[in-house]
């Protein structure tokens, strides 16, 4: 039977096991919307295309399945750009469809035409402009394959509307043929043996865990490895939920706003085992002083990440789950009493802490309360800034795929739409968006989506009336010249209520627990406006391009 | 150091844009780039001449190129026994008086005169880059009007295909 391009799109989504799509209509995708309507395909309409792509991203990060989004040509397509770049930096599988002007009008500056394949070339794993409907099934098959295998990432498919309207006999290819795309999954066994031997001989080893562990689904193997060898574990922002925060071997996050134990541990270790982590500048600080005494092992599925920023002694290209599974029998049970004693002493002496001496709410106390009330079991989404760091520092994650945050690109406005995708993907699990007042306003329109789909997202707004992270840098490095960082904010409670979301205001320290408990127990979405200490800083802090063990704001217990 | 990379890519629109874009955004330098379809019409061969100082830099360039879905194979043939050629068309001012001098230079370099018009000749020369540079410098005094140069193309000597 002959189908139109639009019908083929819907059929292909079904073949790929996709059961919902986030999107926003427009002139060049009407026929796709018509096919979605006629096929009764589950479609979530956001209030902005950026909301759709972040929601698809949140859905993908929370569920591990690819997120799919749809936007019209021109401005619809360009509104996806930030979301695609966000997903690209954090290796999130997304397939994005965009409408396009008809092939006959391409390149003529037609109404709502934008060269979206050209624009997104550097921020997608791959992209396609489909010129012939006969290519569409193959392209969609390839797109899902590329997005979800190897190091995942976003793939964009640009669909001129004549391609959507013309008909062809439909058959979905069984296999893909991509001669230039063959990810390496199994690690070199000789290298894995060297890795085991290096781990055996190390006196002061540290596991440095990134988002790759979650992507590979290697959380259990990592836990077994750490426990068997008694090696302490530090995580990057992307790796936070991959290892239980409350575990005895957990050092917490490393890097710019990392814990003292993690940063001292990395600085003094003699073996650093990087698993699914990419030595980002926010992690390493000054490269020359990073892990100066350590032999470095790096396991990653992306060969280009190995040795990119830091020279590596034992590189292993492969899928983490496979590599760790092969490694486990090769390492013997370790005892590292002396090293663990040292690590424990750092943890004991320099815990993450905060002052609690004025009339304002300490933001850290809010996150800590959320952590305790939910038992570390909620899916936490964040925007970007101070609140994001406090969330990473003070929430004790107990489950994987529970921390959805824009790590690489640092996209303000990510959290609210990501929470939509996560809530839809996770059903009954509690989804909390920890937000700042600056970030929340970047995609505030998505409050309407939350209400429209009756999503019980809990928004915890850490409201300081500033763009707090920039303000903090201005305080430390620009003599408190608060240029452009003082916000005049709306009344968030009234705002929430106008969308149909119940609002709470938290001003009183005594009520942190009781009010948060009440808010989290409320049916449906809520927004809690927490009036936090306006000039609270995220500490400790490694100044930009500083050495990890030279931290500001370290408080000794 | 200057490296010659032989890259096989899927013959598709946009491949050159992907490669050139990757180079510019990662801050690498391309000296020359030449592209053409191979014996297999689905595959194109790109010969890329690049500057890379540290060994690590070339490794990064190669790995980043491999991440492009359309890139099939990359070989650094700088140190291989390979034949490399570029082609230049050089339009030189020429009068009846000096034409024979120019012809002599052309002969020495085993170049060809491919067009003669009133007041100018077009010379076609192929060879390694230094040969092209050498003939150019000898022709300069006569007045070079215009030049068109290809990038370098190269193949490794041996009976096997480097696919």
Image: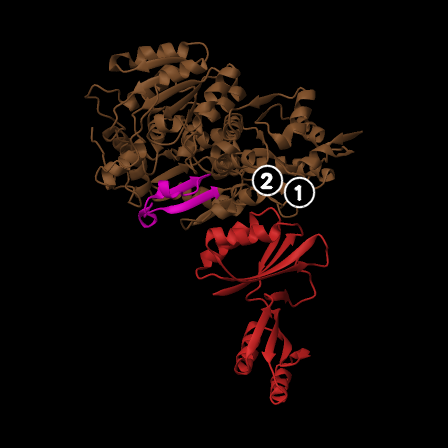
Q: Quadrant of residue B6?
A: bottom right
**Can the viewer see residue A202?**
no
Instruction: Work out how far the residue at label 1 is from the one at label 2, CA to CA, in angstroms.
Output: 9 Å
Residue, disc 2:
A113
**Residue at the image position 45 percent from the left and 13 percent from the top:** A500
Q: Which residues are magenta?
A: A272-299
Check disc 2 and report its element: helix, strand or loop: loop
Chain A on-screen colour: brown
Chain ID, red in image: B
The spot of residue A30 in percent (x, y) is 65, 28
Q: Nearer the viewer, residue A297 or A47?
A: A47
Check disc 1 and report its element: helix, strand or loop: helix
Packing grade of label 1 (10 A; few <14, some 14-19, many >=20) is few
- Image marks 1 and 2: residues in contact by CB distance under 8 Å: yes
**Outermost residue, right direction?**
A1
Q: Is residue B14 magenta?
A: no
The spot of residue A108 in percent (x, y) is 62, 45
Residue, disc 1:
A105
**Residue at the image position 31 percent from the left and 26 percent from the top:** A488
Q: Is residue A277 magenta?
A: yes
The spot of residue A7 in percent (x, y) is 71, 28
Q: Nearer the viewer, residue B40 or A140?
A: A140
The spot of residue A268 in percent (x, y) is 30, 42
């Amino acid at each position: 039977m002959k189908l139109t391009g639009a019908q083929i799109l819907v059929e292909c989504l079904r073949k790929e096991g996709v059961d919902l799509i986030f999107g926003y209509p427009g002139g060049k995708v009407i026929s796709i919307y018509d096919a979605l309507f006629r096929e009764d395909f589950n479609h979530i309409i956001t209030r902005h295309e950026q909301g759709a792509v972040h929601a698809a991203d949140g859905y993908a990060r929370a569920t591990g399945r690819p997120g799919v989004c749809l936007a019209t040509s021109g401005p619809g397509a360009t509104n996806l750009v930030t979301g695609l770049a966000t997903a690209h930096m954090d290796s999130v599988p997304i397939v994005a469809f965009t409408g396009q002007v008809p092939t006959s009008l391409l390149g003529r500056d037609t109404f709502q035409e934008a060269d979206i394949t050209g624009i997104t070339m550097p921020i997608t794993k791959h992209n396609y402009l489909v010129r012939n409907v006969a290519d569409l099934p193959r392209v969609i098959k390839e797109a899902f394959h590329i997005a979800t295998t190897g190091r995942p990432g976003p793939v964009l498919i640009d669909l001129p509307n004549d391609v959507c309207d013309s008909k062809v006999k439909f058959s979905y290819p069984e296999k893909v043929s991509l001669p230039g795309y063959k990810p390496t999954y199994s690690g070199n066994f000789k290298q894995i043996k060297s890795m085991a031997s290096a781990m055996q001989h190390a006196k002061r080893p540290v596991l440095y865990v990134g988002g790759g562990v979650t992507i590979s689904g290697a959380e259990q193997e990592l836990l077994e490895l750490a426990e068997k060898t008694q090696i302490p574990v530090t995580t990057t922002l992307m790796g936070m939920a991959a290892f239980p925060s409350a575990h005895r071997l957990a050092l917490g996050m490393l890097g710019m706003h990392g814990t003292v134990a993690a940063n001292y541990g990395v600085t003094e270790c003699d073996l650093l085992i990087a698993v699914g982590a990419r030595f980002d500048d926010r992690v390493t600080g000054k490269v020359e002083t990073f892990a100066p005494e350590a032999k470095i092992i790096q396991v990653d599925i992306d060969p280009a990440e190995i040795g990119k920023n830091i020279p590596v002694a034992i590189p292993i290209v492969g899928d983490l789950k496979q590599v760790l599974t092969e490694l486990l029998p090769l390492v013997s049970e370790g005892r590292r009493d002396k090293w663990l004693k040292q690590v424990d002493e750092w943890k004991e002496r320099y815990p993450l802490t905060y002052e609690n001496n004025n009339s304002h709410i300490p933001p850290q106390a809010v996150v800590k309360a959320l952590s305790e009330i939910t038992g570390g079991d909620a899916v936490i989404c964040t925007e970007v800034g101070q609140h994001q760091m406090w969330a990473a520092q003070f929430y004790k994650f107990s489950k994987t795929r529970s921390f959805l945050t824009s790590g690489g690109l640092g996209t303000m406005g990510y959290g609210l739409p990501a929470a939509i995708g996560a809530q839809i993907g996770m059903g009954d699990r509690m989804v909390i968006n920890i937000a700042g007042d600056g970030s929340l306003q970047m995609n505030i329109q998505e409050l309407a989506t939350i209400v429209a789909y009756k999503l019980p997202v809990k928004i915890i707004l850490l409201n300081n009336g500033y763009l707090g992270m920039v303000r903090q840098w201005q305080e430390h490095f620009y003599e408190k010249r608060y240029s452009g960082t003082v916000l005049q904010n709306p009344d968030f409670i009234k705002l929430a209520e106008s969308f149909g979301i119940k609002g709470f205001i938290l001003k009183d320290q005594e009520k942190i627990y009781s009010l948060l408990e009440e808010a989290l127990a409320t049916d449906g979405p809520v927004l809690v406006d927490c009036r936090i200490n306006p000039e609270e800083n995220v500490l400790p802090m490694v100044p930009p391009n500083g050495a990890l063990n030279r931290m500001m704001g370290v408080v000794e217990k | 150091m200057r490296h010659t990379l032989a890259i096989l890519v899927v013959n598709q629109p946009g491949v050159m844009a992907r490669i050139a874009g990757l180079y510019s955004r990662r801050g690498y330098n391309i000296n020359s780039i030449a592209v053409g379809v191979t014996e297999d019409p689905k595959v194109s061969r790109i010969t890329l001449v690049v500057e890379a100082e540290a060994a690590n830099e070339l490794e990064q360039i190669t790995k980043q190129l491999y991440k492009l879905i359309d890139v099939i194979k990359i070989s650094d043939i700088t140190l291989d026994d390979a034949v490399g050629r570029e082609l230049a068309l050089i339009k030189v001012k020429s009068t009846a008086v000096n034409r024979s001098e120019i012809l002599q230079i052309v002969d020495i370099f085993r170049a060809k005169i491919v067009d003669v018009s009133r007041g100018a000749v077009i010379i076609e020369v192929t060879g390694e880059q230094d040969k092209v540079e050498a003939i150019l410098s000898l022709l300069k005094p006569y007045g070079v009007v215009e030049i068109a140069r290809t990038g370098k193309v190269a193949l490794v000597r041996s009976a096997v295909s480097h696919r």
